[in-house]
Image (spheres, rainbow, N blue to C red):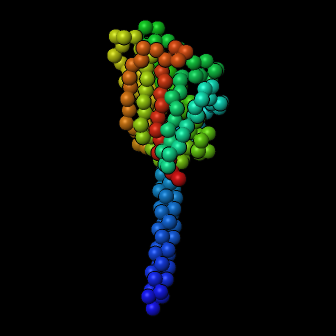
Amino acid sequence: MKYCIYVLLSFLIISCADINKDTAKENSSKEMADVDYNPEAVLDSLNITLRDQGIPVANYVHAARADNLLFLAGKGPKQANGENIIGKLGDSLTIEQGYQAAREVGINQLSVLKAELGNLNKVKRIVSVHGMVNAAPDFKDHSKVINGYSDLMVEVFGDNGKHARAAVGMGSLPGNMAVEIEMVVEVYE
C-alpha cells in the first residue's frame, strides 16, 4: 500500500512539473506576442540599415548570454563607410558630433543584437548602458553625448528601451574613438 501511495505521489509531482513547464512556455510566448512594437519596422521607418560587425579583432566575443541576459561588448562609432568617428569631446569634437557618434554606436549594437537573436522582437528590454566618452579634462557634458545612444534605444524599443545608465569621461579610448558603449539586454527565451 505504501508503495502505491509513493508511486501515485511521484506521478502527481511529475505531472504538475510538466504542467508548470508548459504554462511557463505559454506565458513566455504570450508575453512576447503581447508586445505591440516592432523594432525592425521602426528601424526601416528611420532609414537605418544594420551592419555586419565582422569578427572581433581580439580575444573576446560581441555578446555573451547568461540565462535571459545578453551582455554586449563595448563598441565604437564605426560608420557605414568603415571609419570610426575619432576625437576628443570638448577639444576637437562638439557635443552634437559626440551625440551622433553615440548614435552610430547604437546602430552597431543593434546590429550585434540582430545577429545574436535573429529578430529584434526578442528584446524584452534594454537593462543597462555604460557609456564612455573620450573627453578633455574640463568637459562636463558626458550625458548629452550618450543621449545619442539612449534616444535611439527608446526610438527603436519604446518604453522597453529605457534603461539604467552611466556616462563617464575617459582620458582616451582605443584608436582615439569618440565614444565606446556597452550594454546589457534582457531577452525572451
Q: Residue at x 59, y 22 (%)?
A: 79
Q: Residue at x 46, y 75 (%)?
A: 13
**Rendered view: 1 above or below 50:** below
Q: Left or right of 34: which side holds 55?
A: right
Tell me if residue 158 can be seen.
no
Q: Residue furthest top?
A: 91
Of residues 155 and 136, which is closer to you in this image? 136
**Rendered view: 15 above or below 51:** below
From the top left corner, tell me how far across and down residue 78 is, in percent.
58, 22
Q: Residue furthest bottom?
A: 1
Q: Quadrant for residue 114, please give it.
A: top right
Of residues 59 and 83, which is closer to you in this image? 59
Of residues 180 and 162, which is closer to you in this image? 180
Q: Residue at x 49, y 58 (%)?
A: 28
Q: Residue at x 50, y 75 (%)?
A: 15
Tell me if residue 67 can be seen.
yes
Q: Quadrant of the N terminus?
A: bottom left
